[in-house]
Each structure stands twice: as structure tokens, then as C-alpha cells.
Amino acid sequence: MRKKGTKNKFYSAEFKINVIMDVRENHLGYNEAERKYSLPHSRIQKWERIYLEEGAEGLMKERRGRACKTSGTRKGRPPKLDKKVEEDLIAENQRLRMEIEYLKKTECLSSCGRARGRQKALIISELRQKYPLKDLLALSGLARSTYYYYLGHQNIDKYE
């Protein structure tokens, strides 16, 4: 226990990262690091666990305090999501971004509000660098063969 009236020590995120990197790069044991930095080895272990689970950003979060009894809000680190749930959310976020970008381009290119096949192929070829072709084709409702047909016959105009 700490003596009454002493201040809590605050360690910056840079210091924590430096300690963890020194331990990992120089293969220091917790006892060696404890002597070198004058820190309890349990604190070094805790920092290393946080670093391995959350990366350097995890060491920058404020973790002090208790949960509020009345509102139930927790201070400190939010609970981790399941990997599968997190991957699904990231994929959905990317799909929604793709959809918004596609709709913006469709609105700009077509005056009547609906894009024709050639316009859809043009939009898809612009967005292809950012998003997978399969997803873009599914969003636009254009068949793969139709897309490649319009790519091959882009500059042909029968009235010239």
C-alpha cells in the first residue's frame, strides 16, 4: 500500500512504449526491467499485455476510475468486440461507402436519375481501383460480360 498523502505516479504513453519496446527488443526479463526502470514488474506485464492486445494506441487510453453506479457507464477501456463481429462491421462499412460513392457518381453522370449500361460501366471502371469488381457489379446490377463489352466498345460511335 502507498503511504497516505503521496501522489499517484503518471507515466506518459511514450514512456510506456519505450519500456515495452526495450523489454521486447533487448529480451529483458520483467525483473531486469523492474530494476532498470524502478517499476513493479506487474505494471510492466500489464503494459505489455495491453500493447499486445491493442497496440500502441491502447497505452494512450485513460484507464483510471470506477464505473458509475447510477448510470452504469464505465470509465477506461471499452469492452472488445468479437473478431467476427468486428470484421463484419468493417466489411459493411466499406460496402456502404462504396454504395454512397456509386450513387453520387450515378447522380452526376445521368440527368434522368438512372444510369444506362455504358454509364454504369464508366462508373465501375472509375471505382474499380478502390473496391472489388464483384461487389461493384452486384451493386450496379450489371453483368460481368456486359461490363467488359462496354469497356471494349467505349469509343465507338455509330453516327460519326
Image (cartoon, helix red, strand yellow):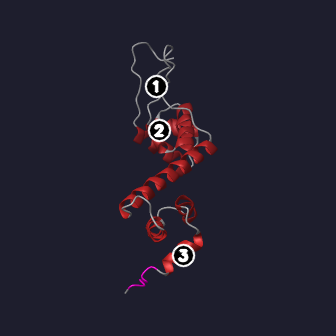
Of circles 2 and 3, the one toward us is 3
For this rendering, which residue is in front, 138 or 25?
138
Q: Does residue 129 appear anywhere in the picture? A: no
Q: Does residue 72 appear anywhere in the picture? A: yes
Q: Which residue carries the number 2 mark? A: 59
Label 1 SS: loop
Q: Quadrant of the C terminus?
A: bottom left
Determine whether label 1 and label 3 are within 8 Å by CB: no
Q: Main secondary structure of the magenta part?
A: loop
Label 2 SS: helix
Task: Report how far apart the C-alphas of labels 1 and 3 lie in the structure.
Answer: 58 Å
Q: Position of residue 138 (x, y in %)?
A: 57, 60
Q: Position of residue 3 (x, y in %)?
A: 45, 15
Q: Count the marks.
A: 3
Q: Is residue 158 magenta?
A: yes
Q: Which residue carries the number 1 mark? A: 64
Task: Report how far apart the C-alphas of labels 2 and 3 lie in the structure.
Answer: 50 Å
For this rendering, which residue is in front, 17 or 127?
127
Q: Which residue carries the number 3 mark? A: 148
Residue drawn at (48%, 70%), measured in percent from left and top?
121
Residue drawn at (55%, 45%), measured in percent from left and top?
89
Task: Characterize the local packing of mark 2: few (<14), some (14-19) or many (20 or more) Cα atoms within 10 angstroms.
Answer: many
Q: Is residue 74 magenta?
A: no
Q: Which residues are magenta?
A: 154-159
Pointer 1 or 2: first along the chain:
2
Residue type for callout 1: Arg
> Which quadrant would residue 157 be assigned to in this image?
bottom left
Is residue 116 positioned above or below 41 on the image? below
Task: Report how far apart the C-alphas of labels 1 and 2 lie in the structure.
Answer: 12 Å
Q: Position of residue 146 (x, y in %)?
A: 56, 73
Q: Residue furthest bottom?
A: 160
